[in-house]
Image: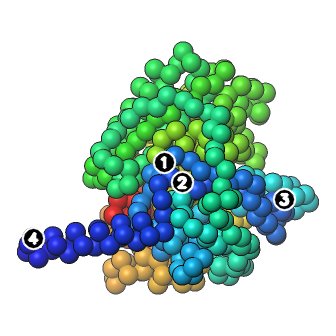
């Protein structure tokens, strides 16, 4: 069998590489944009288009068939009109739209798209989802690499370290761990912390069985002061990324808005995803699909935070817990099937994990069923009613659960392999 399969694999690999070489040259095209608007409108403005040194992403899987995210960017070759790159993503702006202040004012949030550097002029289109979760084009523009792309002046050059290296970045999921709130004197501790976090990640499925598919890099960004800001406690710390607890008045929601500095720092290494490692004992974090994730390092649940937040960023996984007192409780319309693959309103359950449910399991599934049953358990996506999760227990539901449910596990594995094949 091996003789039959091997030539096919080689030719498939060569042809994918040939496709990549037809449209792209070495380096990364970085598009810095701003999203602005209020609760019901969003506008994309492109602020800066630059070149960065490494493309750490895949060369085979350039278009995105997952169909996850609140937004989508699609890149067309201007000669052939062929779609040569696409990526779904979400953003902090999309979450802010559900806050009370979004009802009365407009706000602006920053974000970045990275893609391999195109050889010639491309047409780039940004989409958002309409009220029924269908894609609607919001903005299009053209980029000519010869005239529209400026060099990145790269004001944030830092030392880097390989925490786990298993091969060329083109064929691996590359995670950039970025230091936040570590002073110059604490950088040795930062690298030790990165190794501890990596050990925990590699002890958690599906990362454990995919260890050889994952590289982890550390970027030793230096902060002037140690720790992290917490406005609710009147604590202000001068850190390189200005991360802060109490985002949207949620005590443990730790986020940052200086997205361009984050990307400047990340560009020191080849990366597919970013995890910001925050130097504090407190508990908090956040993660947004194909955007970035962040978590505190010295709390006993730091390893859980990493897996959970990275579940959002890599897999586009929804929270499976109930939290009806936060702004997030309004995010899901129970009359619409959400795009996240691990929750359902049962409006279009067949598009989700319906086919993995045993025919004897009732839908909705009563909480009292015995064992690790796949079903549709009520209580997920911050809502106690009307939103359902695949299994009773999951890392996306509770810090007490040390494993992802079977559905989340398989989504995360598919995502890891996307960056590998
Ligand atoms: Zn799950």
Q: Quarter of the image for the C terminus: give it.
A: bottom left
Find numbered disc 3 in the image and state the secondary structure of the residue it sits on: helix
Q: Position of residue 156 (x, y in %)?
A: 62, 33
**Residue that protrudes farthest toward the top in the picture:** 185
Viewer-proximal residue among 167 and 72: 167
Q: CA–CA distance between discs 4 and 1?
A: 34 Å
Residue marked by disc 1: 54
Find numbered disc 4 in the image and state the secondary structure of the residue it sits on: helix
Q: Looking at the image, is mark 4 or mark 1 earlier in the sequence?
A: 4
Viewer-proximal residue among 379 and 61: 61
Find numbered disc 1 in the image and state the secondary structure of the residue it sits on: loop
- Does any portion of residue 254 appear in the rendered image? no
Q: Residues within 10 Å of mark 2 (few under 14, many from 20)?
A: many
Residue marked by disc 4: 2
Q: Nearer the viewer, mark 4 or mark 1?
A: 1
Q: Looking at the image, is mark 3 or mark 1 earlier in the sequence?
A: 1
Q: Is residue 309 above or below residue 10?
A: above
Q: Are marks 3 and 1 in contact (CB under 8 Å)?
A: no
Q: CA–CA distance between discs 2 and 1?
A: 6 Å
**Residue that protrudes farthest toward the front in the picture:** 146
Q: Position of residue 388 (x, y in %)?
A: 53, 71
Q: CA–CA distance between discs 3 and 1?
A: 37 Å
Residue marked by disc 2: 28
């Amino acid at each position: 069998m091996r003789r039959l399969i091997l030539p096919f694999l080689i030719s498939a690999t060569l042809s994918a590489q040939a496709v990549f070489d037809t449209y792209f040259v070495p380096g990364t095209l970085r598009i810095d944009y701003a999203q602005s608007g209020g609760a019901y409108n969003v506008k994309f403005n492109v602020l800066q288009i630059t070149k960065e040194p490494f493309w750490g992403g895949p060369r085979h899987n350039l278009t995105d068939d997952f169909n996850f995210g609140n937004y989508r960017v699609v890149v067309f070759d201007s000669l052939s009109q062929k779609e040569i790159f696409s990526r779904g993503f979400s953003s902090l702006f999309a979450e802010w739209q559900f806050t009370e202040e979004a009802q009365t004012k407009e706000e602006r949030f920053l974000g970045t798209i990275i893609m391999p550097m195109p050889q010639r002029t491309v047409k780039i289109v940004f989409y958002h989802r309409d009220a029924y979760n269908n894609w609607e084009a919001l903005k299009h523009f053209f980029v000519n690499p010869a005239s529209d792309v400026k060099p990145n002046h790269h004001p944030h050059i830092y030392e880097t370290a390989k925490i786990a290296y298993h091969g060329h970045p083109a064929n691996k999921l590359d995670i950039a761990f970025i230091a936040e709130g570590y002073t110059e004197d604490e950088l040795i501790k930062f690298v030790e912390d990165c190794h501890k976090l990596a050990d925990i990640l590699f002890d958690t499925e599906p990362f454990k069985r995919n260890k050889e598919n994952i590289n982890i890099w550390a970027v030793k960004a230096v902060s002037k002061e140690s720790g992290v800001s917490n406005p609710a406690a009147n604590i202000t710390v001068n850190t390189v990324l200005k991360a802060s607890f109490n985002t949207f008045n949620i005590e443990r929601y730790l986020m940052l808005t200086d997205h361009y500095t984050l990307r400047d720092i990340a560009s020191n290494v080849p990366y597919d995803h970013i995890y910001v490692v925050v130097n504090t004992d407190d508990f908090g974090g956040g993660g947004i699909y194909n955007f970035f994730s962040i978590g505190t390092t010295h709390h006993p649940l730091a390893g859980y935070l990493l897996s959970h937040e990275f579940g959002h960023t890599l897999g586009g996984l929804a929270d499976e817990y109930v939290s009806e007192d936060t702004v997030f409780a309004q995010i899901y319309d129970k009359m619409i099937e959400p795009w996240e693959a691990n929750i359902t309103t049962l409006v279009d359950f067949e598009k989700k994990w319906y086919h993995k449910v045993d025919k004897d399991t009732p839908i909705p599934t009563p909480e009292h069923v015995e064992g690790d049953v796949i079903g549709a358990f009520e209580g997920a996506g911050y809502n106690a009613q009307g939103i359902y999760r695949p299994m009773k227990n999951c890392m996306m539901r509770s810090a007490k659960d040390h494993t992802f449910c079977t559905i989340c596990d398989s989504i995360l594995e598919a995502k890891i392999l996307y960056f590998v094949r």
